[in-house]
Amino acid sequence: MKKRARRSHTGLQGEGALAALKNDRTIAQLAEQFDVHPNQITSWKEQLLAGAADVFERGGSTKSSAPEVDIKALHAKIGELVLENDFLERALGKAGFPSAKR
């Protein structure tokens, strides 16, 4: 018997969960439509309901969950890397190797 390869359901998750919430078809019918196990439809529905509760708990803010970026730290790291590159370029030149710049 041949093994079935793992599938990714990225596009189907939202569609399957929303269809399950509408309750216009049974879980078995939805599972057949999306070609997944009925437990997967139930899991998607539970995840959607849990996520919806979080939206209302936060007050519905539109702020993204992306972490804030520390611009000063990034500029410091860029400066550090530029200094390292300059140092290594000069060291290659002194050693008689051609420059890494094109």
Image: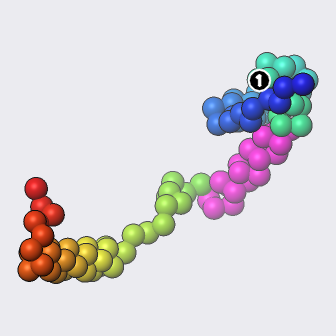
Q: In front here: 9 or 95?
A: 95
Displayed quadrant of residue 54: bottom right
Viewport quadrant of the C terminus: bottom left
Query: Is any atom of residue 34 visible in this view?
Result: yes
Magenta segment boundaries in residue numbering: 42-59
Q: Residue at x 71, y 51 (%)?
A: 51
Above or below: residue 55 compared with residue 26: below
Along the horizontal axis of the image, is 91 left or right of 63? Answer: left
Q: Residue at x 12, y 61 (%)?
A: 101
Along the horizontal axis of the image, is 4 left or right of 82? Answer: right
Query: Mark 1 sits on what residue?
Result: 34
Where residue 63 appears, as percent x and y from the top left, is 49, 58
Where residue 33 appears, as percent x and y from the top left, is 79, 18
Where residue 48 appears, as percent x and y from the top left, is 74, 44
Q: In front here: 26 or 41?
A: 41
Above or below: residue 15 compared with residue 57: above
Viewport quadrant of the N terminus: top right
Q: Residue at x 9, y 74 (%)?
A: 96
